[in-house]
Image (cartoon, rainbow, N blue to C red):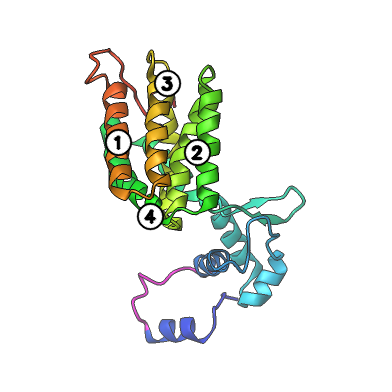
Amino acid sequence: MKDSLGAGASTTSVLGFDPVARRNTYQLVAEAIARAIAEGRLRPGDRLPSERDLSQTYSVGRSSTREAIRVLESQGLVQADGRGGFLVMDYGNLLRQALGLLVGLERVEISDLFEVRKTLEIETAGLAAVRRSAVDLEAISAHLAEMEAGLGDPGRYNFADIGFHIDLASATGNLLTVRLMDAIRDAMSKTFAVAFHLPGNPELSLEEHRGISAAVVARDPDLARVRMRSHLERVEAETSGVQSGRAVTVSLVEDR
Ligand SMILES: [Zn+2]
């Protein structure tokens, strides 16, 4: 017996509309479950309903449900819990994983990364200055303190540095901005690892972050943008060795 998703799907096939574009039942089931996750009806950490329950809910065969779960698993939306069931994963990581893969497979240049960062983060700094809450300021100042404490510890410093930039995204209140920043996090951290080892760079960088923070605290969007731009331009120049003449180049793909 063939799976059916109800009247809509059968009418379409009876009338012979565009059979090439018709999707398989399992794809429709996978999309329906993904929608339930996107709409928050299934949340990260929730157990996915059993194969049998899903089959009944969507009126499809078990094999279609099994295949749909496999698709969701390959997309990272669900993960086997080791006991025959599946858990809903934190889909915020998906964009990051997808982008990390893209950066690994294709030759994404450092200049591309900084171009995206400038496009995104300069305006983000301005919006953060206008919209920041007390909670945002606390997070920002905690990351500044962490950077200072991490001056002798690249891992700690860089983690806090990225955290600072994501705090600003978060302060805009725009979830998509946060997700986009989160997506380029791994690529960022590679350039950070190099920049940290340039003499005097961590101290200088910390001062720049303090300057950006001061503009955000002062609710001065223009100053926040100016300072973010000069921070990113300097780090880019340092990282690519253009300004300093130091032979430092970073590849986003080399160690994969
Ligand atoms: Zn920074």
Which image quadrant is residue 181 in? top left
**Would residue 116 be visible to someone looking at this image?**
no
Above or below, 252 against 57 in this view is above
Under mark 2, the amino acid is: Gly
**Front label number (4 vs 1):** 4
Disc 4/disc 1 C-alpha distance (Å) = 24 Å
The residue singled out by tag 3 in the image is 203
- SS category of the residue bearing label 2: helix
Magenta region, mostly helix, strand or loop?
loop
Residue occupying image coordinates x 51% and y 66%: 31
The residue singled out by tag 4 in the image is 130
Above or below, 215 against 5 in this view is above
Under mark 3, the amino acid is: Glu
Question: Which sits in the foreground, 255 or 219?
Answer: 219
Q: Residue 163 carries which label?
A: 2
- SS category of the residue bearing label 1: helix
N-terminal of the two: label 4 or label 2? 4
Q: Does the magenta stretch include residue 52?
A: no
N-terminal of the two: label 2 or label 3? 2
- SS category of the residue bearing label 4: helix
Residue occupying image coordinates x 54% and y 31%: 145
The residue singled out by tag 1 in the image is 114
Q: How crowded is mark 4: few (under 14 residues within 10 Å), some or many (20 or more)?
A: some
Rendering coords of residue 172 (x, y %): 42, 54
- SS category of the residue bearing label 3: helix
**Would residue 163 be visible to someone looking at this image?**
yes
N-terminal of the two: label 4 or label 1? 1
Q: How crowded is mark 3: few (under 14 residues within 10 Å), some or many (20 or more)?
A: some
**Front label number (4 vs 2):** 4
Disc 1/disc 2 C-alpha distance (Å) = 17 Å
**Left or right, residue 97 beside residue 112:** right
Rendering coords of residue 106 (x, y %): 33, 36
